């Protein structure tokens, strides 16, 4: 049999290669075992981090999420208006929440005007609008179908259509003129009743209000004085 001669350097190289191979094999086994023990990354709610062109999300308890799907692509930060993460930092104006007892169109106008003064876009106006709702109006918004709102104009129309029937019926001018101060009723009480009805009349002029007030006064010094010295309004 022919003898194979291996130098000491070649023998050492073979030992080193064998040691490296064993080390890599052990490392691979450790990686597999570690991946099995590693906990899965937690998600934020039910969603991963969203790309910039996905619909914006508003968290509205008790229902987890209502999606307002906006037609225009979402700009990147610094290209227009704050993303949904920045809504909490927005200087939101103080607006009386709408509870369904006043005119919905007036509420929408106040909302738009106050946000335009702060440079808010229509998309941001749409996203912030739910913050101006309360009670039954807030519940109405919560139960809109997901992806049913595509722009602020559509949201306005649905809102006004839904709550226009709940607005208070305004008084007419005739109701003001048939009012009269009762016997024994103090002037302050009579004035408060008169003023309450007067504020419910659209397009009431100062002259009409003064004439109706004078006509409804009980006979006495004040009524006589107003008849002698008519109001200049």
Image: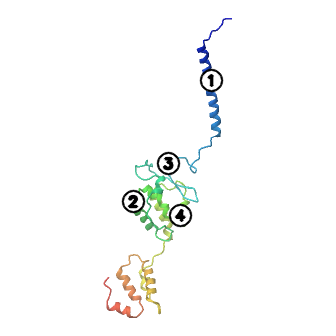
Q: Nearer the viewer, residue 39 or 116?
A: 39
Distance Cα–Cα, label 2 vs label 1: 69 Å
- Mark 2 or mark 4: name the one nearer the start of the chain: 2
Q: Nearer the viewer, mark 4 or mark 1?
A: 1
Q: Quick check: marks 3 and 1 in contact, CB under 8 Å?
A: no
Residue at left offset 60%, top offset 21%: 16
Question: Label 2, on which residue?
Answer: 118
What numbered label is drawn on residue 54?
Answer: 3
Q: Nearer the viewer, mark 3 or mark 1?
A: 1
Q: Is residue 135 above or below residue 87?
A: below
Q: Nearer the viewer, mark 3 or mark 2?
A: 2
Point out residue 161 in the picture as x, y percentages from the top left corner.
49, 65
Circle count: 4
Residue at left offset 37%, top offset 85%: 211
- Mark 3 or mark 1: name the one nearer the start of the chain: 1
Q: Nearer the viewer, residue 198 or 164?
A: 198
Question: Label 4, on which residue?
Answer: 138
Would you call the spot at circle 4 few (<14 residues within 10 Å), some (14-19), or many (20 or more)? some
Q: Quick check: marks 4 and 1 in contact, CB under 8 Å?
A: no
Distance Cα–Cα, label 2 vs label 4: 24 Å
Question: Regarding mark 3 in the picture, which secondary structure is present there?
Answer: loop
Distance Cα–Cα, label 3 vs label 4: 24 Å
Question: Label 1, on which residue?
Answer: 19
């Amino acid at each position: 049999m022919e003898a194979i001669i291996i130098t000491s350097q070649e023998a050492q190289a073979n030992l080193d290669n064998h040691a490296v191979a064993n080390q890599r094999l052990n490392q691979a086994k450790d990686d597999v075992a570690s991946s099995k023990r590693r906990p899965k990354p937690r998600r934020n709610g039910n969603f991963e981090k969203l790309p910039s062109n996905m619909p914006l999300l508003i968290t509205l308890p008790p229902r987890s999420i209502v999606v307002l799907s906006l037609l225009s692509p979402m700009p990147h930060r610094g290209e227009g208006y704050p993303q949904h993460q920045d809504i909490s930092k927005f200087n939101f104006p103080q607006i009386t929440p709408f509870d369904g007892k006043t005119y919905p169109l007036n509420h929408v106008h106040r909302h738009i005007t106050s946000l335009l003064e702060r440079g808010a876009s229509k998309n941001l106006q749409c996203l912030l609008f739910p913050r101006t709702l309360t009670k039954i109006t807030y519940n109405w918004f919560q139960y809109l179908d997901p992806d049913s709102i595509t722009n602020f104009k559509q949201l306005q129309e649905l809102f006004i259509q839904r709550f226009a029937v709940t607005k208070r019926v305004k008084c007419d001018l005739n109701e003001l003129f048939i009012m009269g101060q009762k016997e024994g009723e103090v002037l302050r009480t009579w004035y408060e009743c008169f003023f309450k009805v007067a504020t419910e009349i659209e397009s009431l002029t100062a002259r009409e209000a003064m004439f109706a007030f004078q006509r409804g006064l009980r006979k006495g010094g004040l009524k006589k004085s107003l008849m002698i010295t008519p109001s200049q309004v």
